[in-house]
Image (spheres, coloured by chain):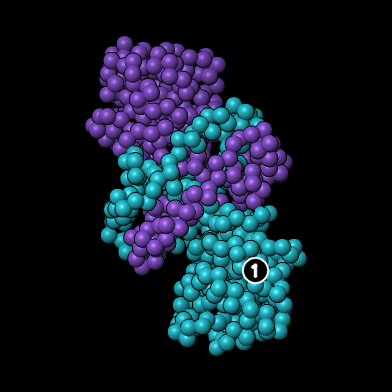
Chain colours: A cyan, B purple
Amino acid sequence: MTQDTSRKIAVLGCGLIGESWAALFLHHGFDVGAWDPSEEARAGFATRLARPLAQLGELTDGAVQKGQLALCATLQEAIEAAEFIQENAPESIPLKQALYAQIEAAPGAATIATSASGLTWSDLCGTMTTPDRLITAHPFNPPHLVPLVELYGPDTARLDHAEALYRAIGRVPVRLNKEATGHIANRLASALYREAVHIVAEGIADVEAVDAALVNGPGLRWSVMGAHMTYHLGGGPGGIEHYLRHLGPSQQRRWDTLGTPELSPEVCDKLIEGIKTASHGRTIPELEAERDAGLMAALKTRAKQI
Amino acid sequence: MTQDTSRKIAVLGCGLIGESWAALFLHHGFDVGAWDPSEEARAGFATRLARPLAQLGELTDGAVQKGQLALCATLQEAIEAAEFIQENAPESIPLKQALYAQIEAAPGAATIATSASGLTWSDLCGTMTTPDRLITAHPFNPPHLVPLVELYGPDTARLDHAEALYRAIGRVPVRLNKEATGHIANRLASALYREAVHIVAEGIADVEAVDAALVNGPGLRWSVMGAHMTYHLGGGPGGIEHYLRHLGPSQQRRWDTLGTPELSPEVCDKLIEGIKTASHGRTIPELEAERDAGLMAALKTRAKQI
């Protein structure tokens, strides 16, 4: 994407999530003003951007104009003349609210998009004088590779602008009609994980087997088609209507048999042991590199299909 | 894979699942004896195999020796001299048990692998004189594309043989240590679907948004890395141990907020309406073709990564 005039995005918080956002905006030709209260976090930021920027370059054969990064000593400098503010502070209500107060005290009326994962819009807007400026824009880890951004907010015009902006940096925005803790994706992930823990806790299968079943079964299919549409196809020629009428009661009974495990010390020990076995000696950075390589291969395939 | 001597597999039941199994075995050079009580099902079988065989050929550049298909008028003919029996009868205990009795009455001692989805090994083995011959070998739809096969049974030697056989036809077998209704994958799918229905029922997001969030978020990631390993990486440098110790309690609280929706007429109406919108006029065969194309692209990517 080539910008006619420079457009500036403020990225507040130079941790992992801020890193991904900055890389995405820079890669797609936006200028970024990045700020973090920690001088140490700011100092290493440009260096840490190299990896996500290289990954994004590889995904698009590097043929994309880069924006300019400015590391800012103050929040005010970062948001000055920014058309959009992506906030990636730690998940603390008072901390985020203090940031919003600083932003509101400065000139400008740019949308403040919070990457908040476990906190909702209502949790965060309470102390704002202009709560309409706030939207939830939750990315999915690692955000420069996984396309999803979950959007919620009261101001449709701001949501429209955010959606266009995220599409311009290759994201897939999805809107919530009503807020919920965990938004959509983490609620789905949490529901699945609960049963994944239950299966291990009950001794039905071990950690490695559960993960292998997911990656080679429903996970693979869900990377192509969602759960609702899958049940539509599972209903045969009559689709979801047939499915719900004929198989709905048995699905309901199956739901009743799903587990509600406790993360007791014994269950935690089983999960930790299971991960040790499933890791086969790979360190966390090695596992992350494998995940990223897999995601990048999958994304290249998608790009070809479109 | 090239066979030195011909190896024969019996495929009992010529429906969709039997079709996928037959295509897989034939594609990898095994001979198949196929039988179905319905003459109509038998008559159209060879024609219906064309599509999955073409898809498998495309996945491996067609460079694989094909086995011979024999359409058999009797079950006895199908299982005669077969080294392995893949049973794909409808999900009915008496119906499957009647088949097993016929197999036991015939000569031979080949393993009977049931594709049963909702029924467990214990549900099915009760009337057998040689229950050790029975194993569960549950594939995931569409079985010729999705690699997972879930295995359970009491006889380790038979499970080892089945596992080797499934690997030889490009499947990824996963063993259960203890049987459970829905095995692993359908339990995970059911848990996720319950929350997907809850989100729609509560008006948090519509069907299309939920599916888009899944496909572009956790679904994509689960096609690369399982849920357990994902939480290991979510724990930072301390991994799953850190995660469970520090974030376990908040995960447990999140589990408590997950929904337990009823498939009431109102909820069913919402789901049906949502699928109509999300389909954008595409028919079920069109949606299936899209799903298969997406799966094949993903599988080609995996093959390149290995």
Residue B113 in the image: above or below residue B291: above
Give coordinates of residue A34: x percent, y percent.
56, 81
Chain of the residue under label 1: A
Q: Which residue is denoted by mark 1 in the rendering?
A: A125
Q: Which residue is located at x 33 percent, y 15 percent?
A: B127
Give coordinates of residue A162: x percent, y percent.
68, 67
Q: Which amino acid does label 1 sit on?
A: Cys
Quarter of the figure with residue A241: top right
Q: Which residue is located at x 66 percent, y 66 percent?
A: A135
B284 relative position to A266: left or right: right
Give coordinates of residue A57: x percent, y percent.
53, 71
Residue B238 in the image: above or below residue A261: below
Q: Which residue is located at x 36 percent, y 12 percent?
A: B102
- Dot 1, how many residues are within 10 Å of its Cα: few (below 14), some (14-19), or many (20+)? some
Q: In which quarter of the image is the N terminus of chain B?
A: top left
Look at the image and tell me whether residue A63 can be seen.
no
